[in-house]
Amino acid sequence: MTSTIIASAELEFAKKSILERIDSKLIKTFFVDEFKVDDAKEVVKEAYIAEEKQKYLILAALKYNTYAQNALLKLLEEPPRNITFILIAKSKTSLLPTIRSRMRVEYLESHKEPYALDLNLAKMGLNEIFLFLKKHKNSSKDELKEIIQTILKELMFTYRMNLTATELDMFDKMMELAEFHARPQSILSYMLLTIHQAQGRPQV
């Protein structure tokens, strides 16, 4: 496997897939929420530890600091012998063009069945919201993110709701909170009550 950027909206799935794909014991992972300059220094240090066999350095982050990326440029352009880099990001645009030009890009998404939302967003009452919250109170981070994405898609494409910029921004913020392991009930209750209040608004 050559040095590669893995672009995937599902970072956990991508990390697991890449680790399963690499047939080597020489793997060093750098999994952080935000990849910073100190992380880049650790990668550089690890890259220059000589190995006789191929070693893989796998980086995965929600966000890559610009200064940290610049600190890796020379290393990515001229990697040490037997070193392969794998950079996992939510989108290739998370990385600088100068980095993208030095590595091939691969898109990776899971092929699981789409989540079925057991809630009528156009007609839900407070009781339905309460039951939904109770059912999903122990959702995992990935399950919660899938619920949020499904709610957004249904509002836009099934119910044709004309979402405001503030409401769209809310979904981005809820995804960020889910990534940082916020309580599912807190996130879902805020979203669903916001949608409930907007139910009487004209659709497009």
Image (tube, rainbow, N blue to C red):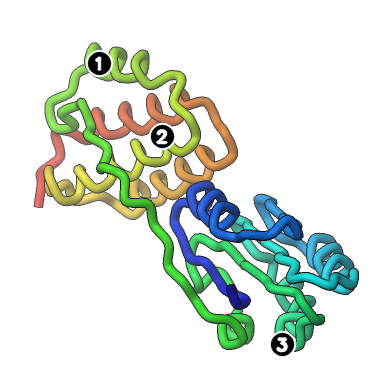
- The residue labelled by disc 1 is 126
30 displayed left or right of 167: right
User: Is mark 3 in CB contact (under 8 Å) with mark 2?
Assistant: no
How far apart are the two marked residues, 3 and 2, measured between alpha carbons? 38 Å
- Residue depicted at x 37% and y 52%: 110
Q: Amino acid at mark 3?
A: Glu
- Residue depicted at x 75% and y 74%: 83
Q: Amino acid at mark 1?
A: Leu
- Residue depicted at x 61% and y 86%: 102
Q: Nearer the viewer, residue 154 or 142?
A: 142
- Residue depicted at x 39% and y 45%: 171
- The residue labelled by disc 2 is 143
- Image position, residue 122 (x, y; %): 14, 32
First in residue order: circle 1 vs circle 2: 1
Q: Relative to 203, does residue 41 appear above or below in the rendering?
A: below
- The residue labelled by disc 3 is 77
How far apart are the two marked residues, 1 and 2, measured between alpha carbons? 22 Å
Q: Relative to 185, does residue 30 appear above or below in the rendering?
A: below
How far apart are the two marked residues, 3 and 1, measured between alpha carbons? 57 Å
